[in-house]
Amino acid sequence: MKIELTDIKKSFGDKVALNIDSYEVNDGEVIGLVGNNGAGKTTMFRVILDLIKPESGVALLDGINPAVSEEWKEYTGAYVDSGFLIDYLTPEEYFSLIAKITNMTAEELENRLHSFKGFMNDEVLGQNTLIRNLSMGNKQKVGIIAAMLTRPKLLILDEPFNFLDPTSQLLIKQIIEKYNQDTGATIIISSHNLTHTIDICTRVTLLEHGRIIKDYDKTTHKDIISEIENYFIENMKKDE
C-alpha cells in the first residue's frame, strides 16, 4: 500500500508537532521512524489513521483519504498505545471479537494465533486474566498480535519493542520481517531502538521537531546507524 502525505501541519497550542511538505511510502516498504521524544512520530501515525485532524494537508492511503472514507480500515492494522485495547476483556475474548468483526473463521483465528505461539510464550492465552491485569510486556504483545491478526496490507506499530524482554524483541523482529516477506505488506514502525529498527527496515526516516530531517535508503546508505548517531551527537553539542 502506498502512503502519501502532502502539506501536513499539526500543532498543539504553540508547539508545532508535525510539519511535512511531502512524504511518500511505497508499496511493500518497511519504514522506520526515529527521533527524540516529541519529534512527531506518534503524531504522524495518528494523522495517517485519522485519529487526529491536521490543520492543513492530506494523508492518502492508496489514494484514499481516511478522513472521508472507511474503506482503508479493511486492510490496515495498527497498535499505537494501550488505548487501542479493550482491557476489560481477556486476550481470548479480544482476539475473538476481532475475528468476528472481520468475518474470520474459528479455524483461521486458531491458525493465526498459533503463528504467534513462541512470541506469547504461554503468558498471554490460557491465563484467565483480563487484559488490564496483564504486565506491560504482555499487553504490548496483545496489541501487536491484534494489529497483525487480520493480515493487513498496511501495518503501523508505534514503539513495538517497548516493554518486551530481549527474547521477545528478537522474536518480533523476525515476525515483522517474515510478515513483510510473505505478504508484501507496507510496514511502518517507530522506535528509539536504532539497532532493531535499522535491522528490519528497508528505509529509515529521521524526524525532529515535526520535520523530516533525513531519509535513508538502506540500499544506498550502508552505515545508517553511525550517521544517525552522529546527527544526535552533533545536536547535543549544539545544546551544550
Image: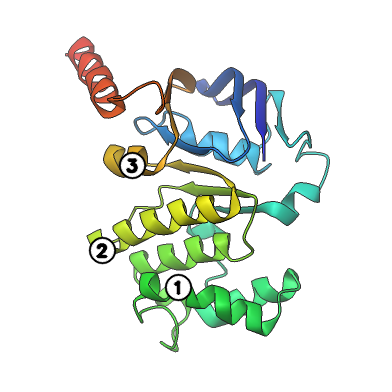
Q: Which residue is mark 3?
A: 199
Q: Which residue sits at x=42%, y=62%? A: 140
Q: Amino acid at mark 3?
A: Asp
Ranked by sequence position, the earlier of labels 2 and 3 is 2
In this rendered view, identify the residue nearer to me: 193 or 171.
Answer: 171
Can residue 19 be seen from the camera position used here? Answer: yes
Mark 2 or mark 1, which is nearer to you? 2
Is 207 on the left or on the right of 167, as rendered? right
Can residue 94 be seen from the camera position used here? Answer: no
Q: How is the image coloured?
A: rainbow
Where residue 10 sits in the image (x, y, percent)?
60, 26
Where residue 123 sits in the image (x, y, percent)?
36, 79
Is 100 on the left or on the right of 179, as rendered? right
Residue 163, quarter of the rendered image? bottom left
Q: Which residue is mark 2?
A: 167
For label 3, the crowd category at 10 Å Cα-Cα, with few meaning under 14, some 14 to 19 and many 20 or more, is few
Q: Which residue is mark 1?
A: 132
Q: Amino acid at mark 1?
A: Arg
Residue 11, quarter of the rendered image? top right
Ranked by sequence position, the earlier of labels 1 and 3 is 1
Above or below — where is 39 with respect to 118? above
Q: Amino acid at mark 2?
A: Thr
In the displayed orientation, state which residue is furthest to the top: 238
Disc 2 from disc 3: Cα separation: 16 Å
SS label for mark 3: helix
Q: Which residue sits at x=74%, y=37%? A: 62
Q: Which residue sits at x=44%, y=84%? A: 129
Where residue 14 sits in the image (x, y, percent)?
52, 20
Ranked by sequence position, the earlier of labels 2 and 1 is 1
